[in-house]
Image: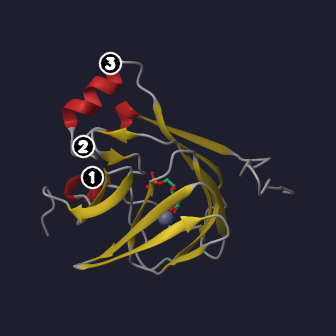
Amino acid sequence: MKNSIDFQTGLLENYLEKTVRKASDMRGFFQDEKALEEMISQGDPTIYEVYAVPNNGEGEISYAVTVIHPGKVGKEFFMTKGHYHEIRNRGELYIGIRGKGLILMQKWAEMKIENIERGNIVYVPPCWAHRSVNVGSEDLVFLAIYPGDAGHDYGSIAEKGFAKIVVEEDGGYKIIDNPKYHE
Ligand code: S6P
Ligand code: ZN
């Protein structure tokens, strides 16, 4: 199928699947549960959207544009749920399109963090869980390209989270230990 992406806006023309994650879909992922419930009761805003073209199967390649809106739950910046690939041995590429963000990557006790910004190419190696965070004041938009059989495993992240969280401090961001994290 022919397709195109607008590299100014990140708009993907012929996406096949749209996933919307509202505040109410993110229960258990942010630290401040009270702030999240309040946000849900006050209109349940969208935290992020994913526009995907899946090509499922071994040897195939899928791609998707993610738009994470700006905002915070308590002091914690809006972010994706984060996942391992269901088939662990599958890597991925992220290409920043607009906005200012971070990608947290984690494998066992190891953690690495890179910037997602316009033009940045971030390689997520096989077996690393990954979550992106919008630390700016506009939408964070990036393109992800991944193997068609990778799949998503949200379970272990939903249960344990990442070892680090990203919070606002003095108008900027700070990366701190996740008080709820356990190995
Ligand atoms: C897929 C890739 C992205 C994410 C998207 C949303 O492998 O990493 O397209 O699916 O950024 O994040 P999440 O954690 O909710 O799937
Ligand atoms: Zn992924």
Please state, as top left, top right, bottom left or bottom right, where the N terminus lies in the image. Answer: bottom right
- The structure residue drawn at horizontal position 47% and vertical position 81%, both measured from the top left corner, is 125
Residue sitting at x 27%, y 52%:
158
Amino acid type, label 1: Ala
Select label 3 or label 1 by which is in front.
3
Answer left or right for 164 relative to 42: left
**In the image, 90: left or right of 51?**
left
Q: Residue furthest right?
A: 2
Quadrant the C terminus occupies:
bottom left
In the image, residue 109 sits, relative to residue 162, either above or below, namely below
Residue at coordinates 13% horizontally, 57% vertically from top-left? 179
* Disc nearer the start of the sequence (2/3): 2
Q: Secondary structure at mark 2?
A: loop
Q: Is mark 3 within 8 Å of ligand 1?
A: no
Reading the image, the residue beneath label 3 is 41
Query: For residue 176, which quarter of the picture?
Result: bottom left
Residue 172, position as x, y percentages in the image = 39, 55
- Residue occupying the point 49% across, 42% down: 70
Answer left or right for 75 relative to 71: left
Q: Are marks 2 and 1 in contact (CB under 8 Å)?
A: yes
- Between the C-alphas of marks 2 and 3, the distance is 16 Å
Residue at mark 2 to residue at mark 1: CA–CA distance: 7 Å
Which residue is at the far top?
42
> Circles 3 and 1: CB distance less than 8 Å?
no
Q: Which residue is mark 1?
A: 158
Q: Badge 2 is on which residue?
A: 28
Is disc 2's CB within 8 Å of ligand 1? Answer: no
